[in-house]
Amino acid sequence: MNETIELREGTAMSYGFFIPSDRRLEVRVAASPKPVNVMLMSEDQWAKYQEVRGKLFGGQYQ
């Protein structure tokens, strides 16, 4: 998969994909003028993240 995405400040992008076996994944990010956050996680981790996301005191993500 080879994809280029351009986002405006304050926006986000998320999407999932299935890897059929143990593979190496390479992610390259070029961000300017400010740094960005990139999170790679399993489907279970994503569900937990979505559950607590945006809640100031609402849960713990690990």
Image: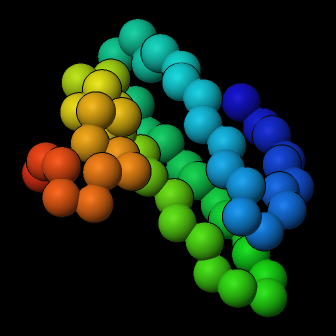
Determine the residue located farthest toward the bottom in the rendered image: 33
Question: Which residue: 54% across, 20% down?
Answer: 17
Q: Is residue 11 left or right of residue 53?
A: right
Counting every numbered tag in the picture gives: 0
Quadrant of residue 40 within the rendered picture: top left
Question: Which residue: 60% across, 37% down?
Answer: 14
In the image, is residue 41 above or below residue 11? above
Q: Is residue 39 left or right of residue 36?
A: left
Q: Is residue 22 visible?
A: no
Quadrant of residue 50 within the rendered picture: top left
Q: Quadrant of the N terminus?
A: top right
Determine the residue located farthest toward the top in the rendered image: 20
| Type of colouring | rainbow
Question: Which residue: 35% across, 46% down?
Answer: 53
Image spot of residue 29 (x, y percent): 67, 65
Please state which of residues 23 and 58 is positioned toward the viewer in this rendering: 58
Image spot of residue 8 (x, y percent): 85, 62
Image spot of residue 39 (x, y percent): 44, 52
Q: Is residue 34 visible?
A: yes
In the image, is residue 11 above or below residue 25? below
Quadrant of residue 43 within the rendered picture: top left
Please state which of residues 17 and 23 is positioned toward the viewer in this rendering: 17
Q: Is residue 7 left or right of residue 52?
A: right
Please state which of residues 23 and 45 is positioned toward the viewer in this rendering: 45
Please state which of residues 8 and 42 is positioned toward the viewer in this rendering: 8
